[in-house]
Image (cartoon, coloured by chain):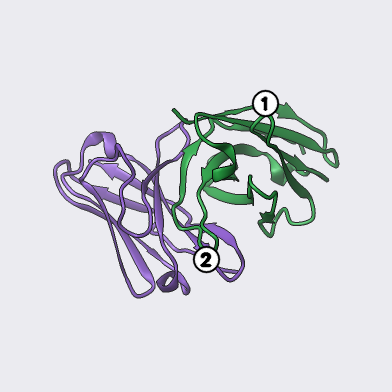
Amino acid sequence: SHELTQPPSVSVSPGQTASITCSGDKLGDQYACWYQQRPGQPPVLVIYEYNKRPSGIPERFSGSSSGNTAALTISGTQAMDEADYYCQAWDSSTGRWVFGGGTKLTVL
Amino acid sequence: QVHLVQSGAEVRKPGASVRVSCKASGYRFTTYGVAWVRQAPGQGLEWVGWINSYNGNTNYGEKVQGRATLTRDISTSTVYMELRSLSSDDTALYYCARAYCTSNRCSSGFDSWGLGTLLTVPS
């Protein structure tokens, strides 16, 4: 089955840039999405189709991809960005979605 | 404004079935599919299934394939998820989420989410 791998945790100082990666064998042929989930809340879509931001998502959130790795970058990280982040992709060969294991972002 | 309102928490015994609902409002129901995602306590997100609200086509995750059925009622803009042969492994918060797909691609992610329905299956 298709799997997406994320680092379990990432730490960043306030105002610095945080980067979270997501790797998968088929990711180069798919369009990665990213979600932010704060404790006790549903996930929020922050990036779709690798690098597009939904309405209302701050410009400091950006996405990129290279080969079979996608990345979420948060520039000028704020305390409010502390949350769990999940990557996601849709597998066109099966019609199924898959999530990465999630990354806990800590803003120290 | 898009809203997805889910039914309340459920407790079931192992081997039983459950049906959870998700009522959509604020958009044209048949334009978007509805996905279900679950999250076990303290764990990550797992995609459960998806239904095309227009034609009723469905797809399911491997762990629930054969045990889950998604249906929709266009007249009430409601999607239902039935899960059978429950075990403690199914204990989780179940979210419904809106998903846009073209004829050959579902790359836009899940842009609106319900608040979740907690399903508890005691071991």
The local crowd at label 1, few if under 14, some if 14 to 19, many if 20 or more residues have their Cα within 10 Å, is few
Specify the quadrant of the image occupied by residue A96: bottom right
- Residue A79: where, in percent of width, then height? 24, 35
Give the drawing colour for chain B.
Answer: green
SS under mark 1:
loop
Callout 1: chain: B
Tag 1 residue:
B9
Checking the image for residue A3, the label placed there is 2
Answer left or right for B116 relative to B61. left
Residue at the right extreme, as displayed: B15
Give the drawing colour for chain A.
Answer: purple
Label 1 in the same subunit as label 2: no
Distance Cα–Cα, label 1 vs label 2: 30 Å
Answer left or right for B7 relative to A37. right
- Residue B110: where, in percent of width, then height? 48, 46
Q: What residue type is labelled 1?
A: Ala
Q: Could you tell me which quadrant the N terminus of chain B lies in?
A: top left
Specify the quadrant of the image occupied by residue B34: top right
Quick one: A73 or B110, which is closer to the camera? Answer: B110
Callout 2: chain: A
SS under mark 2:
loop
